Amino acid sequence: MKRILITGAGGQIGSWLVPRLRELYGEANVLATDVRHLGSDFADAGPFQVLDATDAKAVGECVMRHRPDTVYHLAAILSATGEKDPQLAWHVNMASLEAVLEVAREQHCAVFTPSSIGAFGHDTPKDPTPQDTIMRPATMYGITKVAGELLCDYYHTRYGVDTRGVRFPGLISYGAPPGGGTTDWAVDIYYKALSDGRYTCFLGPDSQLDMMYMPDAIDALIGVMEADADRLQHRNAFNVTAMQLTPTGLAAEIRKHIPHFEIDFEVDPVRQAIADSWPDRIDDSAAREEWDWSPSFDASAMTVDMLEHLNHND
Ligand code: VAH
């Protein structure tokens, strides 16, 4: 039976991943941790511990107590927030990864670390963006993702640590709010469509980015970690995507259900510059070939499911 430790468990991904892993591996085997206390709902649902993932000693002590065989390391500062304090983003994203990799090396844990399409930059081919290509990101977040990919591959090659990761696109979900990313518009739009019938978008109308519905993202997180290691030509990290969306296109999808929905635009130059440096469409054929990646939700199915759950206040 697998034993799992998750850092950043209270974030947009973690709040979905923890219950899914507990269904799969048993509640007692999945220890959720986060730098802040997540309230009784979270803590009462299974093993939880406050953990600052940048504190190597605390991470080591937590691993020695819980004895996980796999660490899902989700704690990180995202792109837009990272640009407000780049030095903090570098510290949080890299000190925490170093702490996790070092204890994984000593205690023989497998490690999942999410990368992002934010690891690509202006010089990267935009459509399609290959699995193996130039990576010169324009944000501190992207720099930590490229450095993280290289560090994870190094720990695999040099020390044999089973490190794996995926480059996530923008992730769309209900429940825990997104955490200060450039793709947060694709989540906020659904909430505002229901509450106000309108949404003011911080990216321009035709800003196309890769996106994915959270149930597919969770399948990718678990799928890559359960893949047969002998099939993997890549490890850190795999391109994965499910759809390409623009604000105009997603608004049209929402209008199929809320006919009067209106969108307008107040472009945030910082987040627009970040989005402009990212791919239009990534090629995820390597993930499909090496571990059978295959998303289930397109924009239409995602919109039906999102509106249904939000209408029921999930
Ligand atoms: C961000 N949601 O916007 C994250 C993600 C591709 C975007 O990495 O920073």
Image (cartoon, grey):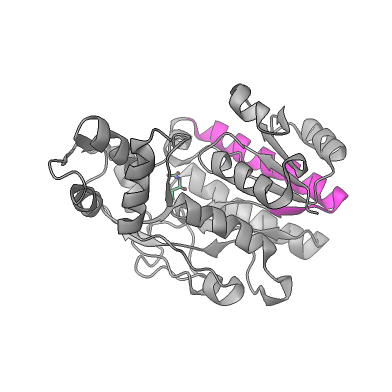
Q: Is residue 78 left or right of residue 67?
A: left
Furthest toward the left, the residue is: 260
Depth check, front residue: 150 or 56: 56
| Numbered disc total | 0
Name the foreground residue: 151 vs 204. 204
Q: Residue at x 33, y 60 (%)?
A: 244
**Residue 197 figure quarter:** top left
Query: Residue at the spot x=37%, y=70% of the render?
Result: 128
Instruction: Kindly identify the residue that appears in the image at 49 percent across and 30 percent down.
Output: 85
Q: Main secondary structure of the magenta part?
A: helix
Is residue 195 in sight in this rendering? yes
- Between 35 and 56, the one lying in front of the other is 35
Residue 206, percent from left and from top = 21, 53
169 lies left or right of 54: left
Tell me the quarter of the image containing the N terminus.
Answer: bottom right
Query: What x and y, as percent, mark residue 272?
Result: 29, 44
Please, which residue is most extreme toward the front here?
312
Q: Quadrant of residue 310?
A: top left
Residue 97: within the magenta? yes
* Left or right placement of residue 96 versus residue 29 in this view: left
Residue 235 lies left or right of residue 63; in this view the side is left
Q: Is residue 111 above or below residue 286?
A: above
The residue lying at 58 percent from left, 33 percent from top is 10
The answer to whether residue 37 shows anywhere in this view is no
In magenta segment, residue 94: yes
Name the quadrant of the C terminus. Answer: top left
Residue 278 on image: x %, y %? 38, 55
Q: Is 64 rendered above or below residue 109? A: above
The quadrant in which residue 238 appears is bottom right
Q: Which residues are magenta?
A: 85-111
Q: Position of residue 143 (x, y in %)?
A: 53, 49
